[in-house]
Image (tube, rainbow, N blue to C red):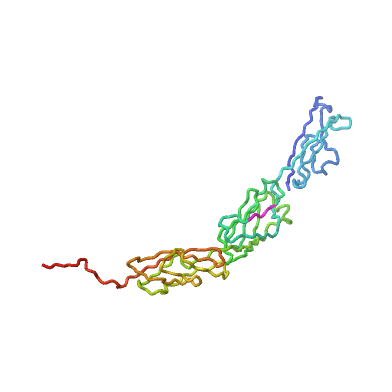
Amino acid sequence: MERTRDTVVQVKAIDADDPNTDNGQVRYTLPNGQTSGLFEINYETGVITSKVSSLDRETKSQYVVVVRAQDMKGRESGCIATTSVAITITDANDNIASFTKRKYEISVPENLKVNEKIGVLELIDLDEDENKQPIFSIPSGTGNVFSTEPSKDNDCILVLKQALDYETQNNYTFTVRVEERLEFDPAENLNVANTTAQVTIKVTDVDEPPVFTLSVYNFSVPEEQMEKTILGRIQARDPDGIRNRIKYSILETGLPFRIDPTSGQLSVLSRLDREVEEQHMFKVKAEEENGGLASFAEVFVKVLDINDNPPELTANDIFVC
């Protein structure tokens, strides 16, 4: 609502007759029935002003009024001229932006990256675009997982600020609020505007690869151990919470070790000799049994020395003087 009783415009008629006589004395009127009595004109000066305290651009943005100028001080014997005046109502920021819906539901994959956009809550503002100046906020309830920012069109963009995990929490419900610094308060549409919206974020599950309990496994074993000697267990879990069986395997071939494909138990497959190789390094793969995603971990096996070699003289003949 554009509130004003200010001057709108001044019209002036020129009369070539002597201005010191009635022949040159012009008076101004607005013929009856125009603009529902919204405007009036000063009889002598021709200044048009609004008769009301408020003009609503959103209801009607332009009016055309006919002005009549009559000399002889407006008497019936005077000559008459008319002109049309177009009055355009300029916009003021007097309507608060409103969400197009009271409730929004958005699905988001759990692997969405932080600072990525989740979705847009559209607004409608009865004012012109330059007067669409919303301020968004999330009062509480999300633990700073989400934030808001304005779009190029000044709609509300929801942004992810913390990583999501379907297995930890798969549903968020919170409120988004919109405010504006209006030129006039209260807003004309305050009683009908949706200044708050309830947002429900549904986190969708994304298949994730198995996760090892360690990224690197270290074992040690004395050399000359018997076949099937157990070194330890390598473990991985399914982060999706589904009890998918995990299958273990050693990537490299020809190693003196084996891993149980079901339990992840690592054992000696053949004789170890520290004098041949004192440390073995290889990778173990953990894969979903259904042929799904896989992860890898490094394994180090240190072969410990035992007293299994007698001393040897470096020469066959020793001479003592």
137 is higher (above) or lower (below) than 43: below
Magenta highlight: main SS: strand
Q: Quadrant of residue 292?
A: bottom right
Asked if residue 159 lies left or right of residue 281, the reply is: right
Percent across and percent down for residue 293 are 54, 63
**In percent of the image, x 83 and y 32: which residue is there?**
82
Percent across and percent down for residue 187 are 71, 52
Asked if residue 312 lies left or right of residue 276, the reply is: left
Residue 235 visible in image: yes
**In percent of the image, x 20 and y 66: which residue is there?**
315
For the image, the number of numbered tags is 0
Residue 120 highlighted magenta (yes or no)? yes
**Residue at the far right in the pictured view:** 77
Q: Which range of residues does the magenta coloring cover? A: 119-123
Asked if residue 225 lies left or right of residue 55, the reply is: left
Q: 70 or 193, which is in the foreground?
A: 193
Q: 288 or 110, which is in the foreground?
A: 288
191 is higher (above) or lower (below) than 265: above
